[in-house]
């Protein structure tokens, strides 16, 4: 079974985990196991992974959506637990970060354009500026899942790039959608855009905000997946 499990989030789903500001998820069911982002605090990330029975040594690759601390802050603690990984980074990553990853014994790879990076797994390519951000694209049966960190470039733009990445329509979007400051009208417009782009399911958390989550839940109905720390989400 292919799934994403949320291992770091400020939004709670299940009891027994340590919440923290940020987002991270483990992707399982492909030939390589991927950690998407690392949350803000390494100890919290590692503690939640332990609770969820995910050993750091199982992770083959780390994918960093963007360089805000709540997504990359836990990276160095993770690399101390397992440095035998490739770390996929967005275009505007600081050179000091690339050097530190290399010195930790891991393999840094900066991604610019969209396409496949591991079997069945792709990037949207780096979009936007300050911060630039990339989304993770996961191939399924004739469709794909997109995972976003904060979706700073806009969820719509990330979905369009995700479709180009693996040539599959995006049916499920998981992650932060950065709607904390957005008006109801803007959130409703986004929800219509998502549906126009063919999205059938959403699993928002992190920086989506309570209003954003509530409106997406109302407008997607059965296609809304209640997400948050500890949640395991089946991929399309
Ligand atoms: Zn951010
Ligand atoms: Zn964030």
Image (cartoon, grey):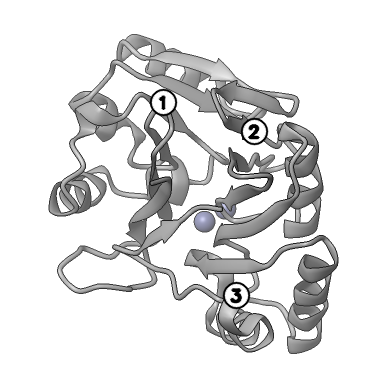
Are the residues at dot 3 and dot 1 in contact (C-beta closer than 8 Å)?
no
Give the residue pinned by disc 2: 123
Say which mark, if any, is on residue 31: 1
Label 1: which secondary element: loop
Q: Whole-Å distance between the Cαs marked 3 and 1?
A: 28 Å
Give the residue pinned by disc 3: 223
Label 2: which secondary element: strand
Q: Residue 210: give x, y in percent of width and height.
A: 53, 83
- In the displayed structure, would residue 205 be above or below residue 142? below
Would the CB of label 3 be found within 8 Å of ligand 2? no
Say which mark, if any, is on residue 118: none
For marks 1 and 2, the one nearer the N-term is 1
Badge 3 local density, few (<14 within 10 Å), some, or many (20+)?
some
Q: In this view of the protein, can residue 129 be seen by the observer?
A: no
For marks 3 and 1, the one nearer the N-term is 1
Depth check, mark 1 against mark 2: the one in front is: 1
Residue at image location 50% in from the left, 73% down from the top: 225
Q: Whole-Å distance between the Cαs marked 1 and 2?
A: 16 Å
Q: Is residue 156 left or right of residue 111?
A: right
- In the displayed structure, would residue 49 be above or below residue 55? below
Label 3: which secondary element: helix
- In this figure, what is the number of numbered marks? 3
Residue at image location 74% in from the left, 84% down from the top: 183
Q: Is residue 10 left or right of residue 158?
A: left
Nearer to us in this view, 36 or 179:
36
Would the CB of label 2 be found within 8 Å of ligand 1? no
- In the displayed structure, would residue 216 be above or below residue 133? below
Q: Residue 134: give x, y in percent of width and height.
A: 65, 39
Depth check, mark 2 against mark 3: the one in front is: 3
Residue at image location 48% in from the left, 16% down from the top: 108
């Amino acid at each position: 079974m292919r799934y994403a499990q949320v291992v770091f989030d400020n939004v709670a789903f299940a009891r027994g985990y340590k919440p923290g500001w940020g987002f991270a998820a483990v992707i399982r069911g492909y030939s390589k196991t991927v950690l998407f982002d690392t949350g803000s605090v390494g100890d919290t990330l590692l503690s939640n992974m332990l609770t969820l029975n995910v050993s750091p040594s199982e992770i083959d690759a780390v994918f960093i959506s963007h360089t805000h601390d709540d997504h990359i802050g836990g990276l160095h603690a993770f690399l101390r637990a397992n440095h035998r990984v490739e770390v996929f980074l967005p275009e505007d990553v600081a050179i000091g970060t690339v050097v530190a990853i290399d010195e930790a014994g891991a393999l840094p790879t900066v991604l610019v354009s969209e396409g496949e990076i591991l079997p069945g797994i792709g990037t949207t390519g780096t979009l936007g500026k300050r911060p630039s951000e990339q989304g993770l694209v996961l191939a399924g049966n004739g469709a794909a899942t997109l995972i976003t960190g904060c979706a700073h470039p806009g969820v719509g733009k990330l979905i369009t790039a995700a479709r180009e990445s693996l040539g599959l329509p995006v049916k499920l979007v998981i992650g932060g959608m950065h709607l904390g400051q957005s008006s109801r009208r803007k959130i409703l417009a986004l929800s219509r855009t998502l549906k126009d782009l063919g999205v059938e399911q959403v699993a928002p958390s992190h920086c989506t905000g309570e209003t954003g989550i509530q409106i997406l839940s109302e407008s997607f109905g059965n296609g809304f997946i209640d997400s948050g720390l500890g949640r395991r989400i089946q991929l399309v």
